[in-house]
Image (spheres, rainbow, N blue to C red):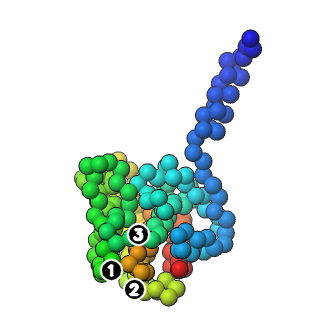
């Protein structure tokens, strides 16, 4: 029988636990493609494991620089007509759905109400503003700003970009804890969102 010292056993268990935990992977500078949505980044980002984003649709991904509680870009490609932009985390949680005939203002409101539903009514205050047109490659879309105040958490600033192509919604949302992390990654995140195309 092999006997291990307490120190060795603790070290072994620590390595085992870390190896079982979901890990981030690297998104290298360059162009990436998610379900036809092409994004270009000039710097590396961390791709969050899907286990850490239970509200994300199967096709969606999350990028972060300093951890999802501090900053993130939600990349939500090809949401079909009649489906929500996020995945419900409980059976009792009814999320609003995207409709292909929605106007830009409707999608702005859809985003606002979806975020509030995910965090729970009364747990977060979400305000969107400055809706403005933007062209994503050959597709006309729009940008809008996001402000979010979370109970027992930091305030967030952000920007979202979206467009509809063949009745599917393509959306990117950047959120950063204010003021430091939001300002730190805002320019790069906005460049990624503005440069998105099919």
Closer to the eye: label 2 or 3: 3
Left or right of 104 on screen, residue 48:
right
The kind of secondary structure element at disc 3 is strand
In which quadrant of the rendered image does the N terminus lie? Answer: top right
- Give how far across and how far down residue 31 sits, in percent: 63, 73
The kind of secondary structure element at disc 1 is helix
Q: Residues within 10 Å of mark 1 (few under 14, many from 20)?
A: some
The alpha-carbon separation of the residues under discs 1 and 3 comes to 15 Å
For marks 1 and 3, the one nearer the N-term is 3
Q: Which residue is mark 3?
A: 79
Q: Residue furthest top?
A: 1
For marks 1 and 2, the one nearer the N-term is 1
- Give how far across and how far down residue 124 sits, in percent: 30, 56
- Give how far across and how far down residue 35 sits, in percent: 53, 70
Residue closer to the observer: 79 or 38: 79
The answer to which quarter of the image holds residue 79 is bottom left
Q: Which residue is mark 1?
A: 104
For marks 2 and 3, the one nearer the N-term is 3
**What's the residue at 60%, 58% (across, down)?**
46
Q: Which mark is residue 133?
A: 2
Residue closer to the observer: 2 or 116: 2
């Amino acid at each position: 029988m092999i006997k291990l010292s307490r120190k060795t056993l603790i070290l072994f268990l620590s390595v085992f636990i870390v190896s079982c935990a979901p890990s981030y992977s690297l998104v290298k500078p360059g162009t990436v493609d998610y379900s036809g949505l092409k994004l270009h980044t000039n710097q590396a980002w961390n791709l969050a494991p899907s286990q850490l984003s239970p509200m994300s649709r199967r096709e969606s991904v999350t990028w972060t620089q300093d951890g999802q509680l501090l900053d993130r870009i939600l990349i939500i490609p090809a949401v079909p007509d009649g489906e929500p932009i996020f995945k419900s985390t409980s059976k009792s949680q009814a999320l609003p759905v995207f409709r292909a005939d929605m106007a830009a203002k409707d999608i702005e409101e859809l985003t606002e109400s979806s975020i509030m539903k995910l965090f729970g009514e009364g747990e977060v205050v979400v305000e969107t503003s400055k809706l403005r047109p933007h062209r994503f490659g050959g597709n006309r879309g729009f940008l809008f700003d996001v402000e979010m105040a979370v109970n027992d958490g930091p305030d967030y600033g952000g920007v979202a970009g979206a467009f509809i192509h063949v009745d599917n919604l393509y959306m990117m949302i950047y959120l950063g804890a204010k003021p430091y992390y939001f300002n730190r990654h805002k320019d790069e995140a906005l460049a990624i969102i503005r440069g998105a195309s099919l």
